C-alpha cells in the first residue's frame, strides 16, 4: 500500500525545505508524550475503590472519572490535529505536555469527587492537544523503513501504556508514597511531563501545513456535540438508570453527525477548510483502516476494565497484585509490535489476520482457565499467564499494524487531519469499549456471577476478533 497523492487544494506540508529529520531522542520524547496520554486512560482502574472510599464518590461519579477523560480526549483530537497543522506541531506538542502536567496536578490535589471529574475532563483536553502532534510529526519527519520502525514503536507504546497504566496504578496505590494513596497515580505525571517538556524543546522538530487553514468553528462545534451525544450516554446511561436525557442524546447523535457531514461537505465544495474533509473518508484505504480499529480498541478497553474488576472484586486481589497480573501481556506485546516491519515484509497485511487468530486463541485459553479453576477464589496470576501471553502476542501486532495501515492511507497533505482522525477512532472506541463491553459485563454479574459474566464478555471480544480477521482479508496484501 502506498501513500495516495492529493490533487485538491488542501494545505500541504512543506517540502522545500522539509522539516528536520526526527532524531532518536526526539522520537523517544514524542513516544513519552504518547505514553502519558494512554497510561492515564487506564491508570485509574485499580485506583477507583480507593477514590470511592476517600471522596465518597457514587458509582456514576466514578464512571465519570473515567468517561470524562475519554470523552474530552476523543472529542478534541481532530481539532488538536488541525491546530498542529496551523500553528506548528512542535509548539502544540509542548503546550499539550505542559497542560497535561498542570491538569495532572489538579487531579492529584482534588478536594472532592466532582473537582476530580472536572480536572479529568481538562486532562483529556490536554491529551487531545498533545497526541495528534506525535502522529503528525512521525508522518512528516520520517520516511520508508524509518517511518515503519517509528510507527511500530508508537503501536507498541500505545498498547503497553495501557498495561503499564494498570500495573503502575496498582503499585502506586499499594506503596502509598507520602500518604498520597490514589493521588499518586496523577501526581507521578508531573515530573515526567516536566522532563518531556525540557527535552522536547531541544529535540522535537517542527512541522506544519505550508498554507495555514482557516478555522472551522461550526464544524468543530458540531463534531464535538455529535461525539459527546454518543459517548456520554453510553458511558453514563447504565450507571444512572438510563434517564430521559441519555435517551434524547442518543437520538440526537446521528442527527448531529448528519449535520456535521453536511457542513463539512459544503465547506469543501466552496473551497473552505473543513475540520475533517469528507473526501478523506471517501478514500477506500482510509475507510478500511478506520474500521479495523473498532474490534481492536473496543475489545481492548472492555477487557482491561472488566479484568480489573474481576481481579479486585471477584478474586480479591490487592491493587499491587491486580496490577502485576497483567504484566505477561506486556512481555509478549512489546516484542510482537517491534516485529511488525518484518512480519509485514513476509506476510503483508495478512499479519493482521494471523494476529487476530492468535489473540482468539489467547482468549479461549483464558476463558477455559477461568471456567476450569476449582475453586474460583484460588485462581492465581500464574494460572492466568498463558492466556495473557497469547493475548499480548496478538494484540501487539494489531496495535502497531493498525497505525501503519492508517498512516499509509492518509495523504501527506492531510497528515494533521488524518492523524487526528485515526487517534479519534482509537479514543472513541476505547470509551465505547468500557461503555458497551464493560457495561454488559457489569449487567450480567448479578444474574450469572462474576466468573460467568467475565467469560461472556470474553466471548463478545472473541467475536469481534473473528470479525477483524475477516476484515483484514479485504486489505491489499502488499504494503510499503
Image (spheres, helix red, strand yellow):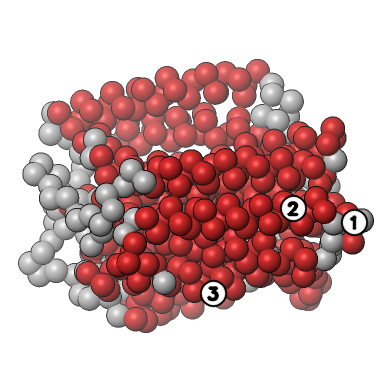
Identity of the residue drawn at 60% across and 20% down: 247
Residue 213, labelled with which disc?
none
Identity of the residue drawn at 22% across and 69% down: 144
Q: Nearer the viewer, mark 3 or mark 1?
A: 1
Q: Is residue 421 above or below residue 440?
A: below
Q: For marks 2 and 1, give the CA distance.
A: 12 Å
Tag 1 or tag 3, which sits nearer the N-term? 3
Residues at circles 3 and 1 in contact by the CB criterion of under 8 Å? no
> Where does residue 109 sit, x and y in percent of width and height?
69, 61
Residue 21, can we see it? yes
Toward the viewer: 174 or 162? Answer: 162
Tag 2 or tag 3, which sits nearer the N-term? 3
Residues at circles 3 and 2 in contact by the CB criterion of under 8 Å? no
Q: For mark 2, does the 10 Å Cα neighbourhood hold few (<14), some (14 to 19), or many (20 or more) residues? A: few
Residue 368, labelled with which disc?
2
Identity of the residue drawn at 34% across and 62% down: 347
Q: Is residue 457 left or right of residue 431?
A: right
> Where does residue 326 sit, x and y in percent of width and height?
68, 65
Q: For marks 3 and 1, give the CA distance.
A: 43 Å
Pointer 1: what residue? 374
Q: Element type at marker 3?
A: helix
Q: For mark 1, does the 10 Å Cα neighbourhood hold few (<14), some (14 to 19), or many (20 or more) residues? A: few
Tag 1 or tag 2, which sits nearer the N-term? 2
Q: Is residue 5 left or right of residue 376?
A: left
The picture quadrant where one finds residue 23 is: bottom left
Pointer 3: what residue? 192
Residues at circles 2 and 1 in contact by the CB criterion of under 8 Å? no
Identity of the residue drawn at 45% across and 31% down: 225
Q: For marks 3 and 2, give the CA distance.
A: 40 Å
Residue 119, can we see it? no
Amino acid at each position: 500500500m502506498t501513500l495516495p497523492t492529493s490533487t485538491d487544494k488542501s494545505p500541504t506540508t512543506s517540502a522545500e525545505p522539509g522539516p528536520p529529520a526526527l532524531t532518536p531522542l526526539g522520537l523517544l520524547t514524542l513516544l513519552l508524550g504518547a505514553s502519558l496520554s494512554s497510561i492515564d486512560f487506564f491508570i485509574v482502574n485499580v485506583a477507583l475503590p480507593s477514590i470511592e472510599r476517600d471522596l465518597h464518590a457514587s458509582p456514576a461519579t466514578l464512571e465519570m472519572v473515567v468517561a470524562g477523560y475519554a470523552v474530552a480526549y476523543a472529542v478534541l483530537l481532530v481539532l488538536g490535529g488541525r491546530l498542529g497543522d496551523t500553528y506548528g506541531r512542535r509548539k502544540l506538542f509542548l503546550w499539550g505536555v505542559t497542560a497535561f502536567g498542570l491538569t495532572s496536578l489538579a487531579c492529584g490535589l482534588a478536594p472532592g469527587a466532582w473537582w476530580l471529574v472536572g480536572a479529568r475532563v481538562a486532562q483529556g483536553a490536554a491529551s487531545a492537544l498533545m497526541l495528534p502532534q506525535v502522529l503528525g510529526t512521525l508522518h512528516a519527519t520520517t520516511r520508508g523503513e524509518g517511518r515503519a520502525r517509528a510507527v511500530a514503536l508508537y503501536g507498541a507504546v500505545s498498547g503497553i501504556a495501557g498495561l503499564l497504566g494498570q500495573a503502575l496504578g496498582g503499585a502506586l496505590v499499594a506503596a502509598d508514597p507520602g500518604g498520597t494513596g490514589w493521588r499518586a497515580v496523577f501526581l507521578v505525571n508531573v515530573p515526567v511531563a516536566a522532563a518531556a517538556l525540557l527535552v522536547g524543546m531541544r529535540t522535537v522538530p517542527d512541522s506544519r501545513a505550508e498554507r495555514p487553514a482557516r478555522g472551522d468553528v461550526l464544524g468543530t462545534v458540531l463534531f464535538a456535540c455529535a461525539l459527546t451525544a454518543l459517548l456520554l450516554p453510553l458511558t453514563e446511561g447504565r450507571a444512572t438508570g438510563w434517564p430521559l436525557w441519555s435517551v434524547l442524546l442518543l437520538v440526537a447523535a446521528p442527527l448531529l453527525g448528519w449535520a456535521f457531514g453536511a457542513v463539512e461537505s459544503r465547506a469543501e465544495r466552496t473551497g473552505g477548510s473543513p475540520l475533517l474533509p469528507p473526501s478523506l473518508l471517501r478514500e477506500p484505504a482510509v475507510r478500511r483502516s478506520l474500521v479495523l480499529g473498532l474490534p481492536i480498541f473496543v475489545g481492548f478497553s472492555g477487557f482491561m476494565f472488566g479484568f480489573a474488576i474481576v481481579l479486585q472484586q471477584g478474586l480479591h486481589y490487592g491493587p499491587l497484585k491486580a496490577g502485576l497480573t497483567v504484566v505477561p501481556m506486556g512481555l509478549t506485546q512489546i516484542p510482537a509490535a517491534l516485529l511488525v516491519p518484518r512480519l509485514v515484509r513476509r506476510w503483508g497485511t495478512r499479519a493482521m489476520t494471523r494476529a487476530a487468530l492468535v489473540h482468539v486463541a489467547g482468549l479461549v485459553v483464558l476463558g477455559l482457565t477461568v471456567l476450569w479453576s476449582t475453586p474460583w477464589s484460588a485462581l492465581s496470576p500464574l494460572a492466568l499467564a498463558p492466556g495473557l501471553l497469547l493475548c499480548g502476542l496478538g494484540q501487539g501486532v494489531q496495535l502497531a499494524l493498525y497505525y501503519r495501515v492508517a498512516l499509509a492511507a492518509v495523504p501527506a497533505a492531510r497528515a494533521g487531519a488524518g492523524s487526528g482522525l485515526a487517534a479519534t477512532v482509537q479514543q472513541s472506541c476505547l470509551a465505547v469499549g468500557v461503555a458497551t463491553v464493560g457495561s454488559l459485563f457489569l449487567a450480567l454479574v448479578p444474574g450469572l456471577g462474576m466468573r460467568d459474566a467475565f467469560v461472556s464478555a470474553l466471548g463478545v471480544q472473541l467475536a469481534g476478533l473473528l470479525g477483524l480477521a475477516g476484515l483484514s482479508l479485504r486489505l491489499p496484501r502488499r504494503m510499503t
